[in-house]
Image (cartoon, coloured by chain):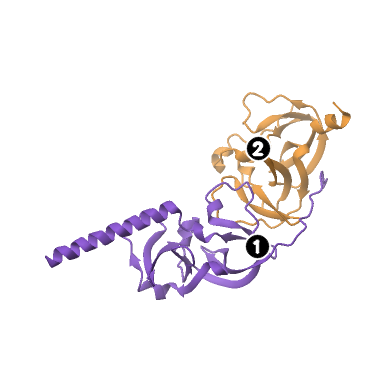
Chain colours: A orange, B purple
């Protein structure tokens, strides 16, 4: 394995949502986009809340906040743009975040048994543990009602 | 942090323009290609000629109208799109499909960019409702597919209902004559 590959494999973008921290593999993250207009229109796809336009491209937005923090996304939100694969196609996709993100290099630790399916592993960062999100499983998870989602929000355990 | 991990390339070409009618339904803005609309009438003017479909098999269709030799099923666009019901003021009589669509109002006619396909993320009925999304100024507008207002299955059911009603009426008429 080359040094570059090793760095990429262990690189994560730590994002904040509703005051909690989560991580995504850096290799799928494109950018942190500033607050822009969320275009909403009638549709029937769960979790998708609308579409933003970024550099002339239409990027679907997944509202993952109910699943992760049991609350709706903050009103003035930034968007973390990542790539989602659809068979042979790739599509830029966005999730709302609070705006504070950082790039960290850390070893991916195993997922605790009782973790939700969208948790791909854990990171030990500082004195805390951060859930690493499986982006595909997160955006295709059955939508959680706000009240029940709050019962098992993502954990940022302190060790 | 505002770290940019990879650069998102800009799309290169400007999309061709199409003449469109921008209308609202349930308070939401939509576009439809102007050449897909045969006629725009006030809903009130159509009320006298609309025939109720008793026990309609399609919830969004309660009436039909005759325009010349053709039958058009009157589609409530709010029900179609799952929006809060509003009082429709206009009806768009479509060209090429037997649907007359009740809408709130016409906002304007405009040359809009040809719609971009819906992102892959969308996987519900909206893939049948819309031809895609058009960017007008800083806003994305769904461009409706006229053929999406009534599916083949819905049309088959509605036509069958009309035939049954017609057969029933004929029988009643014959009974009255004998």
- The image quarter in which residue A105 lies: top right
Q: Quadrant of the C terminus of chain A?
A: top right
Which residue does the image show at 81% across and 30% down from the upper left?
A106
The quadrant holding residue B63 is bottom left
Q: Residue furthest bottom?
A: B45
Tell me where residue B62 appears, x and y as whole percent.
37, 61
- Depicted B118 relative to depicted B101: above or below: above
> The numbered mark 2 sits on a residue in which chain?
A
What is the distance, in whole Å, between disc 2 and disc 1 at their CAs?
A: 30 Å
x 27%, y 61%: residue: B166
Residue carrying label 1: B114
Report the front residue among B79 and A14.
B79
Against B177, residue A143 (above or below) is: above
State the image coordinates of residue A88 (x, y, percent, origin top left): 68, 40
The answer to whether any part of residue A25 appears in the image is yes
Farthest front residue in view: B69
B101 is higher (above) or lower (below) than A95: below
Snapshot quadrant of residue B74: bottom left
Is residue B150 shown left or right of residue B170?
right
Where residue A136 is drawn, which disc sits there?
2
**Whether residue B58 can be seen here:** no
Q: Nearer the viewer, residue B13 or A57?
A: B13
At horizontal 64% and vertical 38% (from top left) the residue drawn is: A138
- Secondary structure under badge 2? helix
Q: Nearer the viewer, residue B131 or A60?
A: B131
Quadrant housing the N terminus of chain A: top right
Q: Nearer the viewer, residue B58 or B83?
A: B58
């Amino acid at each position: 394995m080359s040094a570059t590959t090793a760095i990429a494999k262990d690189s994560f973008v730590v994002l904040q949502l509703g005051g909690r921290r989560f991580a995504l593999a850096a290799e799928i993250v494109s950018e942190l986009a500033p607050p822009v207009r969320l275009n909403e229109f009638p549709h029937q796809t769960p979790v998708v809340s609308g579409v933003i336009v970024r550099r002339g491209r239409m990027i679907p937005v997944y509202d993952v906040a109910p699943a992760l923090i049991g609350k709706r996304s903050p009103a003035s939100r930034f968007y973390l743009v990542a790539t989602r694969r659809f068979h042979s196609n790739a599509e830029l996709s966005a999730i709302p975040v609070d705006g504070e993100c950082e790039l960290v290099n850390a070893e991916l630790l195993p997922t605790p048994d009782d973790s939700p399916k969208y948790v791909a592993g854990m990171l030990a960062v500082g004195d805390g543990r951060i859930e690493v999100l499986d982006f595909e499983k997160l955006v295709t998870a059955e939508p959680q009602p706000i009240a029940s989602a709050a019962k098992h929000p993502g954990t940022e355990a302190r060790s | 942090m505002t770290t940019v991990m990879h650069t998102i390339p800009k799309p290169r070409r400007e999309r061709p323009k199409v003449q469109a009618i921008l209308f609202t339904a349930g308070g939401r803005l939509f576009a439809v290609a102007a050449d897909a609309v045969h006629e725009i009438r006030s809903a009130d003017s159509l009320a006298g000629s609309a025939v109720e479909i008793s026990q309609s098999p399609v919830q969004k269709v309660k009436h039909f109208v005759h325009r010349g030799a053709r039958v058009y099923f009157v589609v409530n666009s709010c029900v179609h799109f799952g929006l809060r019901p509003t009082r429709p003021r206009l009806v768009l009589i479509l060209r090429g499909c037997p649907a007359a669509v009740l809408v709130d109002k016409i906002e304007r006619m405009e040359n809009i960019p040809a719609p971009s396909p819906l992102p892959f993320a969308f996987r519900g009925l909206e893939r049948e409702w819309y031809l895609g999304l058009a960017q007008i100024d800083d806003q994305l507008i769904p461009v409706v597919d006229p053929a999406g207002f009534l599916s083949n299955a819905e049309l088959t059911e509605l036509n069958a209902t009309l035939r049954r009603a017609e057969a029933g009426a004929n029988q009643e008429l014959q009974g009255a004559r004998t």
